[in-house]
Amino acid sequence: MGGLLSKFLTDKQAENQGVWVAYEDAVNDDGTYPEFCIKRISTNNTAYQAKVNPLLRQLDALSRKENANYNEYKKVNEKLAYLYIDEILVDWRNVKNEAVIDQDGNTVVDENGVAICEEIPFSKEKAREILGDPDFIEVLNWLMKQSTDVSNFLVSNRNKDLKF
């Protein structure tokens, strides 16, 4: 199959099970990149859509309300973030703390001179703790953008450099 149809044909398994995307703007002290396994946000993801649509309607109603309270917005946005984490974010790897520092203030390195960084194991709870923190809203926004970017899920791209 060629032409327009093949250009936009998505890998349904990848959409439902997730693809790995690297956050290359945040190099760990050991030179690795944080990577996230994400599902696709689309109209085909009916379970997610059924849960997100009422929250989006709440935001819309708040935006029309004259005396909308900031805390109301904050509460709905927190629910949206947690919904993303619970339904779309599948896993992560190379999400690490900063390099280990010894008692003398020196960076601890391995036998190859690479900084030793402690990996943060993935769990939904840890993801909520980290990505739910307002300081990390841009990481969550980036992940959401990746989840809607069809190019991450195209059949034509699946055999390239995306890793499972």
Image (tube, rainbow, N blue to C red):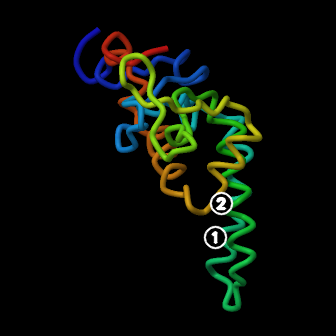
Q: Secondary structure at mark 2?
A: helix
* Rendered image: mark on residue 133: none
Q: Secondary structure at mark 1?
A: helix
Q: Amino acid at mark 2?
A: Leu
Task: Identify the residue position indicated by label 2 in the image.
Answer: 56
Q: Are marks 1 and 2 in contact (CB under 8 Å)?
A: yes
Q: Residue at x 49, y 29 (%)?
A: 116
Which residue lies most toward the left here? Answer: 3
Who is closer to the viewer here, 60 or 145? 145
Image location of residue 125, percent across then percent down: 77, 41
Relative to 17, is 69 on the left or the right? right
Who is closer to the viewer here, 154 or 111? 111
Relative to 122, is 31 on the left or the right? left
Image location of residue 42, percent across then percent down: 54, 37
User: Is 159 drawn above or below residue 115 in the view shown?
Assistant: above
Who is closer to the viewer here, 64 or 23? 23
Q: Quadrant of the N terminus?
A: top left
Task: Identify the residue position indicated by label 1 in the image.
Answer: 60
Q: Amino acid at mark 1?
A: Asp
Packing grade of label 1 (10 A; few <14, some 14-19, many >=20) is few
Packing grade of label 2 (10 A; few <14, some 14-19, many >=20) is some
Q: CA distance from mark 1 to mark 2?
A: 6 Å
Q: Is residue 42 visible?
A: no
Which residue lies most toward the bottom here? Answer: 67
Relative to 4, is 163 on the left or the right? right
Image location of residue 161, percent across then percent down: 33, 16
Image location of residue 157, percent across then percent down: 33, 18
Q: Looking at the rendering, which quadrant does residue 110 occupy?
A: top left
Give the total number of marks visible in the rendering: 2
